[in-house]
Structure formats: C-alpha cells, structure tokens
Image (cartoon, helix red, strand yellow):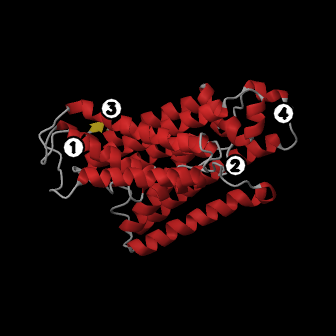
Amino acid sequence: MTETENPVHPQATATRPAGRPGEGATYRRLELKSLGELAALVVLVAVFTALNPGSFATAVNLQTILDQAAIPLIVGVGATLVILMGSIDLSVEGVMGAAGMTFVLLSANSRDTVDLGLWAIPVALAVGVALGLLSGLVHTRLKVPSFIATLGVWFVGLGTATVLFGEAAIPFLAEGSLQSWPSGRTLGLPNSFVLAAVVVLLGVAVGRFTRLGRHAYAIGDDEEIARDNGVRVDRYKLLVFLVAGGCSALAGVLASLQLGAGSATVGIGTLFLTIAAVVIGGTSLGGGKGGILRTALGVLLLTVLNNGLILSGVSPNIQSGVSGAVLILAIVAAAWPHRSRLRIVK
C-alpha cells in the first residue's frame, strides 16, 4: 500500500537528502503493519463466524456492517488529513449535529413547511465547511492549539444544532425516495457504503496527487522545514480543516437520513470510533505518516469488532471497554518505537 508513504513536496528534498538511513525500513514497517491489520480482520471474521455461525457470516449482516461503516469512513477522510498535519479535529460530532439539523429542517419534514429538496444538502455541507473554516481560523490566525480550537467548535456546532432542534416536536423526514436512499442498493452494496467508498477514493486521490495532500504530509513531517521550503503552511492547514468540516457535514446528512429524523446528537459516538480507526490504521498522531486507505481498514476492523460483539451478546459497557483497550494498545504500539521523539499535537 504505497499510500502510506510520505509524498513530500519536491522542494523539501533540498533539505532532506534522499535515501536517509532507516527511511526504507520505516516504509517496510508500514507495509508489514498493513498486513497485520488485514490478518487481524481475517481473524476477527473467523472468530465471530465460529461464535455466531448462523448470523455473522450472512449476506444480511455483511450489508449491515457496510452500512455501519459508512459514516466513520466519510469522517475518517477528513480526520486523517488533519492528523497527517500533526493536528487533530475534535469538532466532528458538533458539526454533524449542526449540518444534520440544517438538512432535515430544509427538507420536507413533519414540523416545518420549508422544502428545498436536494438543495438542502449543499446548504448543510456549507454549514460544515463554515464550521471547519472557524476551526482553521482560530488555529492558524489566533495560534490556538488545534485540539482546543476544534473542541470549541464542537460546542458551537452542538449549540447550533440544539437551537435548531428547539423544544417543538421532533422533525421527522417526510416519506420519500430521499429518506430511503441510504438503505437502497447499488451493485448489491448499500448506497451509504457506495457514497463512503467514493469519498474515500477522492480522499486518497487528494492525498496522493494534489498539492493539498502532499503539503499535509510535509507539514506533519516537519512544519518548519515545510515553511522554509515555501509551503504556505497556514493556508494549507485552513484548507484541510475546510475539507474535514465538509466530510463531517456529509456524515451528518447521511446519519440524519439513516435516522429518518433530525437530532442534535446524531453524531455522538462518531469521534471516538473515527480517531480510534485512524490510530489503529497506523496514521501517526505526530503527523507525516499514514494514509486514508489505512484509516478505512481501521474502520472496517472496528466495525466488524463491534458488530461481532453485539451478535455474541456482549453488553454495551463491555463493548466500550474492549474498544477502549484496543485503542490504547494501538497507540502504545504506534508510539513505542518513536517514544524518544514524540511531539505534542499542534
């Protein structure tokens, strides 16, 4: 999976000699880790198939797993790009709530007479992009650490969603093709998963073949060297936060369609799953190494784990404990080889 390599901007080679000692070994470790994640996924499938022979390895459950993976896959694209820069985005759930409520209230629903049809989607996406812009501006212009800036935007988004939800009746989406779209099928796959797969592929293309993606890697690898080589660091950080806001907004729209109603808390639980998937996928929290395909693999791994635990009758509390333990182990495994040069998230 060559996507895990760091496609540093060509100018950066002036200060980074080619063929650094250990560079090839680093990429080999990344490739081996990808194989390890695939092996873990295969083992999980085998274990849960043995434990639940009549319910896990079925076409219906496969569709369920893919449908459940759709939202974290979409959010994971933006989250990975942010983390590749050495930053982090904690605003996901607030952005999802604000965008989701905007979409529902501007679509045909049981509470209001406004109906923009499909135009409600770009308006909702614009809300997410605006919140991403706010995160980026607070981080780059005011020099506030990204985790504090985006945590503040999390509250802004959730507050906006709560105000939109109000105290009136829950706004249910009117029956129609739009509401049923996520559960429809394209080439035998859930439409929600097809949408997520398209977003993932677009994210991979951005990461590998655009200046935005290359600069995200370069900034995460060494922000000062990137700046010295002419990279407009603040500009590209801002653009990445815009992308992340758009991804979270799209996830909020999809989650609202799946729910069939508006909810200020439609995104709750998504942040942990997404960050866990990014880390388990091998993207470095210090930035500069990792990739979107690896995050997608992490999402599938966690989705299969959660689905299998549910089918096995494991209580939700134990499921949360298992997921937390997996995340801690993944962080320790990723950080231990580089413990002498770890950096604080910027």
Q: Position of residue 230 (x, y in %)?
A: 73, 26
Q: Where is residue 175, by image quadrant?
A: top left
Q: Upstream in the sequence, badge 2 or badge 1?
A: 2
How far separated are the C-alphas under marks 3 and 2? Answer: 40 Å
Q: Position of residue 224 (x, y in %)?
A: 76, 38
For mark 4, give the secondary structure.
Answer: loop
Query: Quick check: marks 2 and 4 in contact, CB under 8 Å?
Result: no
Q: Position of residue 254 (x, y in %)?
A: 32, 44
Q: Which residue is mark 4?
A: 16
Q: Residues within 10 Å of mark 1 (few under 14, many from 20)?
A: many
Residue at image position (53%, 49%) is: 89
Q: Is residue 342 visible?
A: yes
Residue 84 or 201: which is nearer the viewer? 84
Looking at the image, residue 94 sits to the left or right of residue 89; the answer is left
> What's the amino acid at mark 4?
Arg
Q: Where is residue 120, by image quadrant?
A: top left
Looking at the image, residue 43 sits to the left or right of residue 230; the answer is left
In the picture, the disc for residue 105 is 1
Q: Is residue 5 visible?
A: no
Q: Upstream in the sequence, badge 1 or badge 4?
A: 4
Query: Quick check: marks 3 and 2 in contact, CB under 8 Å?
Result: no
Q: Looking at the image, is 255 positioned above or below residue 310?
A: above
Residue ranking furthest to the front:
142
Query: Quick check: marks 3 and 1 in contact, CB under 8 Å?
Result: no
Q: Upstream in the sequence, badge 3 or badge 1?
A: 1
